[in-house]
Amino acid sequence: MNYKGKAHRVGDHIDTDAIIPARFLVTTDAVKLGENCFAGLEPGWVKRVRKGDILVAGRNFGCGSSREHAPIAILGAGMPVVIAHSFARIFYRNAFNMGLPLMEAGDETANIQDGDELEIVAREGRIRDLTRGFDIVCPPLPESMSAVLNAGGLVGHVRKRLGKA
């Protein structure tokens, strides 16, 4: 899985209510949720995002309640991958279950600036900042997680394994 897009930064300890506030949880439609992505952080934030852009976060991204809507909203906003210093564990699992790949890059994430052009090779665990000319190496996506992502999430993966794809 390779990705290329403009970085959109958010800070540390961004919780799931900031990603998609409770008032928008009346649907699971990715497009509708995406229209309100980060409305709890800054109304209209998502209007800066173009399809394929990359979300870059600080520490403990996705903390708070176990809300499957949060990774769906990020995908619905057009961001196919998230890079962060670290992720809240329940968000980490929910993201992969919903088909959203995550790259945990530690302290080096702070070197990526809002608007930088990024290129990601997830299988190698390589993030290249094309704007500033540096690479970040992080753990590559495990094969088991790649299989889940390639099927569009956990439901698709289980259907495929059961021969009902």
Image (cartoon, rainbow, N blue to C red):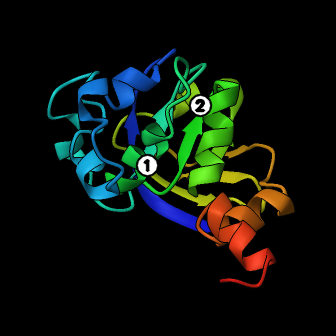
- Residue pictured at 48% horizontal, 44% vertical: 71
Residue 57, x across and y down, in percent: 50, 30
Q: Is residue 30 visible?
A: yes
Separation of disc 2 and disc 1 at Cα? 23 Å
Locate the N terminus and report the quarter of the image it occupies: bottom right
On screen, 78 above or below 10? below
Badge 2 is on which residue?
Answer: 109
- Residue pictured at 79% horizontal, 52% vertical: 140
SS for dot 1? helix
Observer-nearest residue: 107 or 148?
A: 148
Residue 31, x across and y down, in percent: 27, 57
Locate the C terminus and report the quarter of the image it occupies: bottom right
Badge 1 is on which residue?
Answer: 72
Q: Amino acid at mark 1?
A: Ile
**In the rendering, which numbered label is found on residue 122?**
none
CB of mark 2 within 8 Å of CB of mark 1? no
